[in-house]
Amino acid sequence: MKLTENKTVLITGATRGIGKGIALAFAKNAAHVAFTYSASVAAAKDLENQLKEFGVNAKGYQSNAASFEASQNLVADVIKDFGKLDILVNNAGITKDNLLMRISESDFDDVIAINLKSVFNLTKAVIRPMMKQRDGVIINMSSVVGVKGNAGQTNYAASKAGIIGFTKSVALELGSRNIRCNAIAPGFIETEMTAKLDETTVDGWRKAIPLKRGGTPNDVANACLFLASNLATYITGQVINVDGGMLT
């Protein structure tokens, strides 16, 4: 039996990078996959087709995770379309980096809304159906920056640190209902976005990591898959660093 067979997972922000890696990992392990996207209908349709090749149901939903109402409607639609919802992966996020003295109020607010408030919105939307079925898994994507901070990323660091506190509190509130909530804190993960960076800079980051390489979306996806599976039924309220030893 595969790790998430016959489970239904909802993943926010899944058409590229880490989110796409997570979606594919769940489909490979026989989970039915609902996912959100913000802009590209073509990318969403392409991902749907890739996921269905594994013999599972898959559907993309264009939705704004920063909107409370949209999040409520999204979860209702997923349950209507798939029949149930077992796993939520809060992955949607953005960066708008700048030094604090230069960062605008709108850039701070946007990052907090999309990275942190979205986690509240979606978690709030899933807890009633999960409590009713007395079973559920919530996985929130934080970052090593939320653990240690980073110059030029006060908004991003604040949002990701907030996710950690939120995760631990939800775990305490919902543990008695058999709902587990954990966070993953990725380090330097090589994606389409990092491929655009200067190679000298990227190589310097790799050399500073104890494992001497950047991570891949699959590295994060495998941790996510583990936390969602029955291999992790006694793990809740934790932050798993997927960082090659960066924070060691």
Image (tube, rainbow, N blue to C red):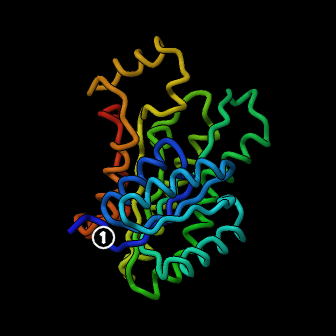
Residue 167, image x, y percentages: 46, 61
How far across and down, in percent of the image, does residue 66 sit?
A: 68, 58
Q: Amino acid at mark 1?
A: Glu
Residue name at image x 46 percent, y 37 percent: 148
Q: Which residue is painted at 41% across and 66% down in the image?
A: 181
Residue 163 in the figure: left or right of residue 26: right
Question: Horizontal placement of 217 versus 126: left or right?
Answer: left
Question: In the rendered view, would you say 80 is above or below 52?
Answer: below
- Pointer 1 residue: 5
Give 197 or 41, whichever is nearer the viewer: 41
Viewer-proximal residue among 40 and 173: 40
Location of the C terminus by quadrant is top left
- 213 vs 38, nearest the viewer: 38
Residue situated furthest top in the rendering: 200
Whether 41 is drawn above or below 214: the answer is below
Residue 75 is drawn in which quadrant? Answer: bottom right
Whether 182 is drawn above or below 17: the answer is below
Give neighbour class at mark 1: few <14, some 14-19, many 20+ (Cα, 10 Å): some
Q: Label 1: state its secondary structure.
A: loop
On the rendered structure, is 122 left or right of 234? Answer: right
Quadrant showing the N terminus: bottom left
Residue shown at the point (51%, 52%) measured from the top left: 47
Residue depicted at 62% across the width and 28% down the height: 152
Q: Is residue 161 above or below residue 3?
A: above
